[in-house]
Amino acid sequence: MPLSRLTPVIGSARVAAAERELFALRSRLDGREVWHVSDTAARGGVAEALREELPYFRGAGIDTRWATLAAPAPFRRFTKALYYQLCGVRTGEDGLWPEIERGRLLYERVCRASADWLIAAAADRAGIVVVHDHQAAGLVPPLREAGFTVLWRAHIGAPLHPQQAEPAWEFLYRYLAYAHGCIASYPGALPRGLPPLPGPYIVAPSINPLAAKNIPLRAPAERVRDVVGPLPPHTPLITQVGRWDAVKDVPGVIRAFADHVDPAFGARLLLVGPSTEGDPQAAEVYERCCRVRSELGRLRARVHVLRLPVADAREHALTVNAIQRCSAFVVQKSLAEGFGMTVSEAAWKGRAVIASPVGGLRRQVAHGRSGLLLAGPDDLAGLGAAADRLLADPAYAAELGREGRERVRRHFLIDTGVRDLARVLARTAPT
Ligand code: UDP
């Protein structure tokens, strides 16, 4: 994908600035490969980011490859429990692996096998490997030992309760200490109080305005009707989009809607996530969300818990796009959040956002200018009050949405992400 496709959206000066970094990286690499390793290509923010960023590197002639872990179910269970602990939140599921250390052997075995696969698949060992998030962190030592330049990119953010998260971060740092550099989404994203990691370099996540997820749509309301069913005319939609993960706190959103949003507005709540097929942890969280909904009484007819099929990635993205576009505003009530691309996606569509004041959400939402931040991640009454305010005053919501779109244009579009990543790769590439 050539960056010049973005010229109509961001202008030629920004395109040229990002191209300069890509060309500098290409000459620095001199034909060597850049590999990315992540947990999955199927769902979530990391997959979304890689799917959108990497074609621009390839478009600039940089030999870029993406591999995912061959992860058996127990590995997924372990890394999910580790994730909750890294986020410093209690989810009721932590008991699965009461001691992180018990999972170490399994974790290292899977990471070692994936590292061996990559060592065999790579043209040589002189390239760069970027391993993403906690799932792939265990590849750092074996890949470094094999001769690669290894960077770790963190998409997760600072924990909600740092002390609670400490053992999990200590677990991770043992592998990360071998990295040539670390990449974080914003300054302060990695917890303090641990030995400093090399870098950390900052690369903000970004969204692609040309992706099916973000392009303008001709008839978004029809798509929404297809998945939600018929709605009374002018029904305001309140939406949260995300993986089925306890950290996204969908039950909290449902309770805030039921207990604190004025029913007189006639709003509907849409809780949107991917299909849970082949993902038992996500299925459990989804079931729990359905249970909370089913306990609502009459109000449950106004709450839609939706799993969207993922088999056709483009169709899926277009549907999420349509839902975000047709929403009165969008919510992201996460308990912890590395970045939260759903916020930039909604803002780019001119939607106001109500978000918890955590991690990357706090960095994206300028309170009172591009959206509203809650007093804390458990501020259910605050969520209700913020929702009522936007439902009562759509002109205010539109004003927040306009400013949100401009903030995304300035800080969170894909040319910026590509430019900054290219700069870090060039800086750390071996000579
Ligand atoms: N997403 C999606 N379909 C869904 C739920 C989420 O395409 O059913 C996308 C969402 O639009 C966003 C990404 O997955 O692009 C989630 O990224 P975010 O940074 O918000 O959260 P993460 O998954 O990294 O925790």
Image: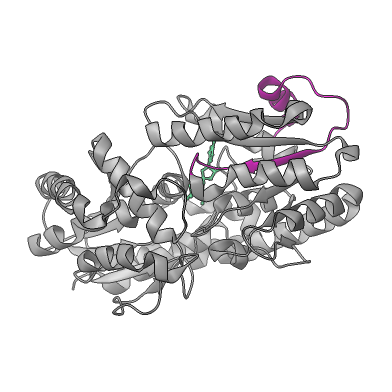
- Asked whether, in this view, residue 332 is left or right of residue 287, the answer is right
Magenta segment boundaries in residue numbering: 217-245
**Vertical relation: 330 (above or below) 140:** above
Q: Return the x and y of residue 282 as percentages of the image width and height.
A: 44, 36
Which part of the image, by quadrant, shows the C terminus? bottom left
- Is residue 111 one of those drawn in magenta? no
**Vertical relation: 388 (above or below) 217:** below
Q: Return the x and y of residue 283 as percentages of the image width and height.
A: 45, 31
Nearer the observer, 29 or 252: 252
Q: Return the x and y of residue 395 as percentages of the image width and height.
A: 90, 53
> Visible in this render: residue 318?
no
**Vertical relation: 329 (above or below) 300:** below
- Asked whether, in this view, residue 420 is left or right of residue 207, the answer is left
> Visible in this render: residue 170?
yes
Nearer the observer, 128 or 279: 279
- Asked whether, in this view, residue 14 is left or right of residue 227, the answer is left
- Which quarter of the picture shows residue 311? top left
- Is residue 234 one of those drawn in magenta? yes
Q: Return the x and y of residue 184 as percentages of the image width and height.
A: 41, 67
Residue at x-position 60% and y-position 35%: 272
